[in-house]
Structures are given as C-alpha cells and as structure tokens.
Image (cartoon, helix red, strand yellow):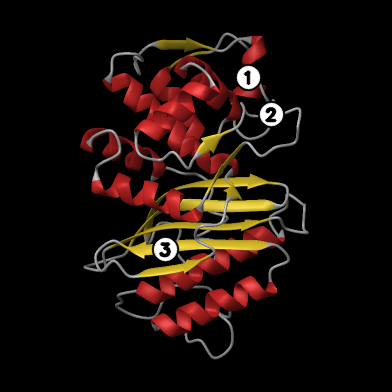
C-alpha cells in the first residue's frame, strides 16, 4: 500500500514522463480522501461521454419520453465505423433501446450511440438533459464520426466525470434504480486495457467503468470496488494531447492510464496480501 505522499509523488512522476496532458481524480467514497492531478482542466472525453448519454436515456425514460423496451431497427444511414459491432452487421437488425444502451457501454458501439442520440432528440437535447441531471460541464459536441471541424466528440473535466461516477455509486443519477442499472451494465465493460491494465486478476478487484480511446487520447472513468471492507473509489484517469497518435495496445496513453490505475489501487489496497499488480509497474522505491 502506498502512503498518500508516495501516491502523489508517483502520479507526478507519471505526468512528468508523459508527452501530453495527464488528468486524474480518484476519490475514496468512504473516507473522502482524494488523489488528483489537473482535476479542473478541460479534456476531451472520447467514448467516456457515453455514460452521460446512458444517464439521459434513463432520465427521459422516467419522464415517459423514451421506452427502453421499445424495438429499435438499424438502418443503413445509422451505421458508423469505429468501435462496436452493429456497423458490420446487416441493416435491419432489431433490438431494444435497452440493448442499444448495453452495446454503447459494453462494446462502446458507435452506431448504437448515434441511434440513441437521435432518439433523445439530438445533441442539444442530450446536453440539456445531462445539465438537468447536475452535470452541465459534460458537453457533447456532435454525433460520433460526424464532425467536419475536427473538434472532440465531447469535453468535460476529470473532476466532473469522477463526480458522475461517485453519484452513480450514491444512487443519485436519475434515481437509485437507474443508477444501479447503469452500474450493472458498466460492470460488464469488455475493455480492460486502460485503468486495470496492470492488475494481476481479470475480475478482482471489481470495476464498473467506461473507456475512451481516440488518437492522442486515452481515458477511463469508473468505480473501483476494493475487497473486504476496503470500500469503493470513484475515478477519472486520462492522458490527452499525446504525441503518440497510434491506436495500438502499446500506445503511450494505454500505459499512462494503466499506471494511474496501479497507483490508485496501491494507495487504497486493503489487503490481505500484497497489491495485486504486475511486478515493476510502480517506479523504483515505491513498494508494490
């Protein structure tokens, strides 16, 4: 386990070695202790904004504006490349609105995301709804893949994104049932290449999280559930404006966010036993 000072120094070392901008907020929800770096700086979100879109689906569902059990049929014009599976399946596939939400979170499906944005009334309606939920700092700019200006898909701050995750764990996003539904879906996230990159076990400690990956950016927001009486940590960890623009598993951003995840786990690991991290992840002099 790292002391608070050791954890802070480790984050500083990761940020100093990074070619871009590092952002971190990790808050232990039991003690209130926070580990942060550039917490109020505006960052792009990439696909982590899909958590906010999911929240707006459930907000509108509670208002009777959206039926999550309603059928949704993919059309040729809906299909957009990038992450997900719907774009490589034939148009005419039928699922439910709830299925679109699951695909958007678990596989980060871009086609499902755009279909949901349309269902919600468009980009402006999503932003208005997310603001009504208490998160006006999360701003969607356009549908996935439809920017003619090169602007990011969405922007926010690490502090706001971590607060969204903390609010989910508190049961206050829309209502307790909606928050729990979202966390349940987030627990099935298939991408573990970022925050838990250096964890030794694939399912311990548990995570409810969403990743975001575009050229020059990697981000992961979620709730880390520590074993035993260790409690939970809400977090946002990002590497933005990176010189490394590649989309490979060895890209700089993957390693930076993975190291931030290792530091957070090492700060609050309750035991028993050593912190379950791959050897050598933390800098020399910092015990793992």
- Residue under the point 48% across and 78% down: 8
Q: Is 203 on the left or on the right of 139, as rendered?
A: left
Residue 145's label in the rendered image is: 2
Of callouts 1 and 3, which one flags the residue occurring earlier in the amino acid sequence?
Answer: 3
- Residue under the point 43% across and 24% down: 99
Vertical comparison of 50 with 94: above or below: below
> Helix or strand or loop: what does disc 1 sit on?
loop
Q: Position of residue 20 (x, y in %)?
A: 70, 62
Q: Nearer the viewer, residue 125 or 89?
A: 125
Corner quadrant of residue 26 = bottom left
Quote the CA–CA distance across marks 2 and 1: 18 Å
- Residue under the point 67% across and 23% down: 80
Of callouts 2 and 1, which one flags the residue occurring earlier in the amino acid sequence?
Answer: 1
Residue 89's label in the rendered image is: 1
- Mark 1 vs mark 3: give the one in front: 3
Residue 243's label in the rendered image is: none
Quote the CA–CA distance across marks 2 and 3: 30 Å
Of callouts 2 and 3, which one flags the residue occurring earlier in the amino acid sequence?
Answer: 3
């Amino acid at each position: 386990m790292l002391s608070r000072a050791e954890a802070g120094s480790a984050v500083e070392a990761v940020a100093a070695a990074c070619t871009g901008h590092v952002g971190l907020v990790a808050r232990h929800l039991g003690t209130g202790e926070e580990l942060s770096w550039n917490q109020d700086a505006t960052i792009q979100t990439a696909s982590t904004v899909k958590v906010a879109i999911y929240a707006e689906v459930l907000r509108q569902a509670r208002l009777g504006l959206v039926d999550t059990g309603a059928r949704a049929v993919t059309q040729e014009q809906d299909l957009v490349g990038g992450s997900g599976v719907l774009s490589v399946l034939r148009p005419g596939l039928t699922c439910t609105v709830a299925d679109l939400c699951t695909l958007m979170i678990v596989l980060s499906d871009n086609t499902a995301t755009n279909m949901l944005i349309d269902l919600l009334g468009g980009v402006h309606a999503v932003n208005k709804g997310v603001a009504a939920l208490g998160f006006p700092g999360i701003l969607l700019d356009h549908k996935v893949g439809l920017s003619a200006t090169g602007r990011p898909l969405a922007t926010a701050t690490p502090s706001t994104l971590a607060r969204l995750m903390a609010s989910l764990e508190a049961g206050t996003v829309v209502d307790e049932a909606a928050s729990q539904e979202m966390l349940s879906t987030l627990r099935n996230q298939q991408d573990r290449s970022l925050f838990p990159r250096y964890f030794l076990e694939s399912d311990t400690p548990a995570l409810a999280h969403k990743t975001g990956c575009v050229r020059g950016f990697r981000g992961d927001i979620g709730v880390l559930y520590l074993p035993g009486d260790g409690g939970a940590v809400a977090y946002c960890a990002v590497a933005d404006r990176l010189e490394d623009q590649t989309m490979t598993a060895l890209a700089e951003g993957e390693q930076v966010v993975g190291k931030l995840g290792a530091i957070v786990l090492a700060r609050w690991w309750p035991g028993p036993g050593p912190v379950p991290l791959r050897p050598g992840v933390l800098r020399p002099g910092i015990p793992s």
